[in-house]
């Protein structure tokens, strides 16, 4: 990645992850989901966490089956992070509307870890109702089979982005296949499924041999799902974000910025700064310290450029900071006041092409 890396603002029309589910459920064809797909007896949508378009392009040899599908590059949401993107995929709207605007979100109870639905390690399911926090009904209010890890069944984030679906938990990747095929055989016309192995391995190992082997496994997994589907079914594969290998390039938020903020939120590649009583203007000036590796963008510009969609609810805007430090180079920028995970080797969240571009792959029986 170079210093002239271009920022990729999300598309919020048909070429976005949020346009897939509405097309399927309303049977209204669009650029990504044409009529021939909608005519299928069953559509399975498989979300592979962390499998970006550029990572697929760069590793053709490890992904022979995925490369055999009909492929289109689309954009995920801002920030390019799991909680925001999975909620947009399921609800069909950008984060500005559903309100899950990132990984760590300010609330009256404290900084919410939106994936764990916790503040300071304590569960907030009782104190922060996922349904109130994220009011948009997933899957347009329908209840399709939703297949994800079994241990996610009772989590706050599952309630926020998958509620009302017919939850089916898998305990191993093999039983992910089992659960998908079971639902198809019982007559489901749309099945949502989720697998997180690529993201996990990239976080822990970066793009080394472990990652290469995980990609090969995922390619075989997708092929196995496809082979088990009956004639007349379609398998769609997409992702929530891509990844960037950061390694040990961990930067601490400059001291002057720390002094001028009441808090930070978001994550290490999309860090929201919340101004203290000194105001946003002086904070923006101080934040230029990191401009050699990141874009420094005030909230007003973010809203004007519709990073979070054409509509941003009042509640969603209240959860945003005054200014965002959005990593341009392969670095992580951390607030020394907050515990984080400094040993994550690959990361995401920013608006680089490596993180923003994801695939939509189609395989028809």
Image (spheres, grey):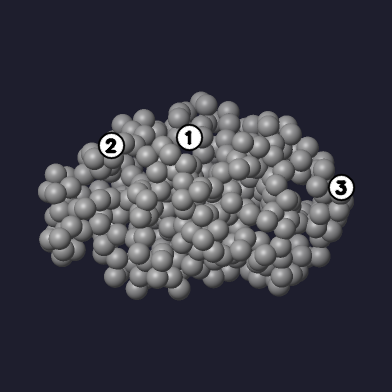
Q: Report whether 235 appears left or right of 62.
A: right
Q: Secondary structure at mark 3?
A: helix
- Secondary structure beneath disc 1? helix
The answer to whether residue 331 of the structure is visible from this angle is no
* The disc label shown at residue 202, or none: 1
Q: Residue at left 58%, top 48%?
A: 158
10 Å neighbourhood of mark 2: few (<14), some, or many (≥20)? some
Between disc 3 and disc 1, the foreground one is 3
Q: Earlier in the sequence, mark 3 or mark 2?
A: 3
Image point (19%, 63%), residue name = 280
How many residues crowd mark 3 within 10 Å: few (<14), some (14–19), many (20+)? few
Which residue is the site of mark 3?
185
Nearer to us of marks 3 and 2 is 3
Gap in Å between the C-alphas at discs 2 and 1? Answer: 16 Å
Measuring from the top left, give residue 356's x and y in whole percent: 46, 54
- Precedes in sequence: disc 3 or disc 1: 3
Residue 106 as seen in the image, left or right of residue 184: left
Snapshot quadrant of residue 288: bottom left
Q: At which x and y percent is residue 11? A: 49, 66
Image position of 252 (left or right of 66): left
* Residue lying at 62% horizontally and 53% vertically, measured from the top left: 162
Disc 2 element? strand
Q: Does 203 sit above or below residue 357?
A: above
Residue 250: give its label: 2
The image shows residue 330 at horizontal and vertical percentages of 33, 42
Other-residue count near label 1 (Cα within 10 Å), few / some / many at <14 / 14–19 / ≥20: many
Q: In front: 216, or 137?
A: 137
């Amino acid at each position: 990645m170079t210093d002239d890396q271009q920022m990729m603002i999300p598309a919020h029309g048909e070429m976005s992850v949020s346009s897939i589910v509405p097309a399927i459920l309303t049977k209204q064809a669009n650029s990504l989901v044409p009529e021939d797909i909608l005519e299928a007896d069953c559509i399975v949508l498989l979300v592979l966490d962390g499998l970006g378009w550029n990572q697929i392009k760069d590793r053709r040899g490890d992904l022979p089956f995925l490369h055999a599908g009909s492929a289109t590059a689309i954009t995920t949401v801002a920030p390019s992070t799991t909680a925001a993107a999975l909620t947009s995929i399921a609800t069909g709207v950008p984060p500005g509307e559903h309100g899950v605007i990132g990984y760590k979100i300010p609330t009256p109870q404290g900084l919410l870890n939106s994936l764990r639905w916790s503040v300071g390690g304590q569960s907030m399911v009782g104190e922060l109702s996922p349904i109130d926090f994220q009011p948009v009904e997933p899957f347009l209010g329908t209840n399709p089979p939703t297949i994800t890890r079994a241990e996610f069944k009772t989590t706050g984030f599952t309630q926020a982005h998958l509620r009302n679906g017919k939850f089916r938990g898998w305990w191993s990747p093999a039983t992910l296949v089992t659960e998908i095929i079971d639902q198809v055989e019982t007559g489901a016309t749309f099945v949502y499924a989720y697998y997180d192995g690529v993201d996990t391995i990239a976080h822990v190992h970066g793009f080394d041999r472990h990652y290469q082997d995980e990609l090969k496994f995922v390619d075989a997994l997708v092929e196995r799902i496809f082979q088990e589907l009956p004639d007349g079914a379609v398998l769609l594969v997409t992702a929530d974000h891509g990844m960037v290998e950061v390694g040990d390039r961990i930067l601490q938020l400059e001291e002057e910025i720390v002094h001028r903020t009441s808090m930070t939120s978001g994550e290490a590649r999309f860090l929201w700064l919340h101004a203290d009583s000194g105001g946003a203007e002086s904070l923006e000036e101080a934040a230029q310290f990191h401009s050699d590796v990141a874009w420094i963008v005030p909230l007003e510009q973010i809203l004007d450029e519709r990073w979070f969609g054409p509509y941003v609810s009042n509640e969603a805007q209240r959860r945003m900071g005054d200014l965002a430090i959005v990593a341009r180079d392969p670095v992580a920028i951390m607030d020394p006041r907050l515990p984080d995970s400094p040993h994550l080797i690959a990361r995401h969240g920013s608006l680089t092409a490596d993180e923003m571009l994801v695939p939509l792959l189609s395989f028809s029986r």
